[in-house]
Amino acid sequence: MRGFVSALDELRHLRHGGGQVRKRDNRVAFWFLAPWFAGLLFITIGPVLASFGLGFTRYNLIQPPRFTGLDNFARILTDERLHNALRVTFTYVLVSVPLQLACALGVALLLDRGLRGLAVYRSAFYLPSLLGSSVAIAVLWTQVFGTDGLVNRVLGFFGLEGRGWISDPSTALSTLIVLNVWTFGSPMIIFLAGLRQIPAVYHEAAAIDGAGRWSRFRHITLPLLSPILFFNLVLQIIHAFQSFTQAFVVSGGTGGPSDSTMFYTLYLYQQGFSRFDMGYAAALAWFLLLIIAAFTAINFWAARYWVFYDD
């Protein structure tokens, strides 16, 4: 009996000591995480809340903010140039994102066949996604579609007359759409990973039953790949709405010609850093957040009708 009591005492001591060790480990972990929490508070949450407050003011960086209520948000409803920027941005998103995902899926299907040097092809196709939002690629794009650019030289080789693709309002936006489609590497990698997770036995059974490639793609590959497609769709729509560098570099920061490349983000930048209307720019930023949230909510609502989960 005395030995049993001593064992209980030792167990209580170990539990008490273990609790002290856990508390010490928690304190150490907190101190390691403290810089991250400080950054989250002062670099992310603080500016976000400040921008929300500035959206209800008139502020030009020189004079103190002056509360104006809902004037900035009411101005959104009557700003004709903003409405044109919305039209340009919606066209860019609704055209470039489906084309980009279609190219990404097509290339992923080709790479899924087990080509030699798969790692090389995968890296080559993924590289534009890393550089697509950079200033260097945007400058290169102006050289490709400029009056004396690569596209016109190729057309001239075949006896066709080119044009100033970037300087023409009817084609300037199309060049930016092509640029976004060209950066299909990131969703392609995700599609390729999803294709590798589809059991081959499904395709083998369907082939034995006489199903062709298109039938297997439509009834097996697409349903099982639909969660990946949904994931890529949401991410690429958000990314397309935030596009800025391409339009800024190609148009020289003006959104020209004739506001044909005036993205929403570029117009927001002009209001904040060219006209120093920080209050209106903050309101535009929160309005863009609402637009992206609305598109994301619509995607999640529609997902129940076409996204298939195996479980």
Image: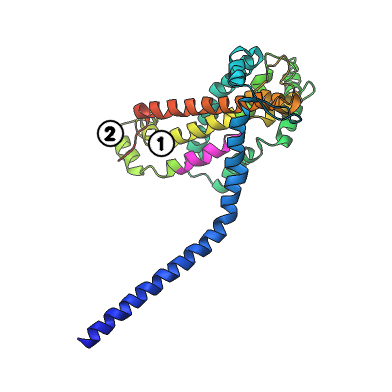
Prevailing secondary structure of the magenta residues: helix
Looking at the image, which residue sits at the far bottom? 2
Quarter of the image for residue 200 reads: top left
Q: Is residue 225 above or below residue 29?
A: above
Quadrant where the N terminus lies? Answer: bottom left
Closest to the observer, 184 or 42: 42
Residue 25 visible somewhere in the drawing: yes
- Span colored in magenta: 181-193
Quadrant where the C terminus lies? Answer: top left
Q: Secondary structure at mark 2?
A: loop
Closest to the observer, 143 or 26: 26
In reply to whether residue 8 is colored magenta, the answer given is no
Residue 120 visible somewhere in the drawing: no
Closest to the observer, 113 or 243: 243
Q: Which residue is mark 1?
A: 227
Residue at point 61% right, 35% down? 50
- Residue 92 is marked as none
Give the residue type that dot 2 points to.
Answer: Asp
Residue at point 43% right, 70% down? 20
Label 1 vs label 2: CA separation?
26 Å
Q: Is residue 43 left or right of residue 200?
A: right
Q: Which residue is mark 2?
A: 209
Q: Residue 301 appears at what percent x and percent y?
A: 39, 27
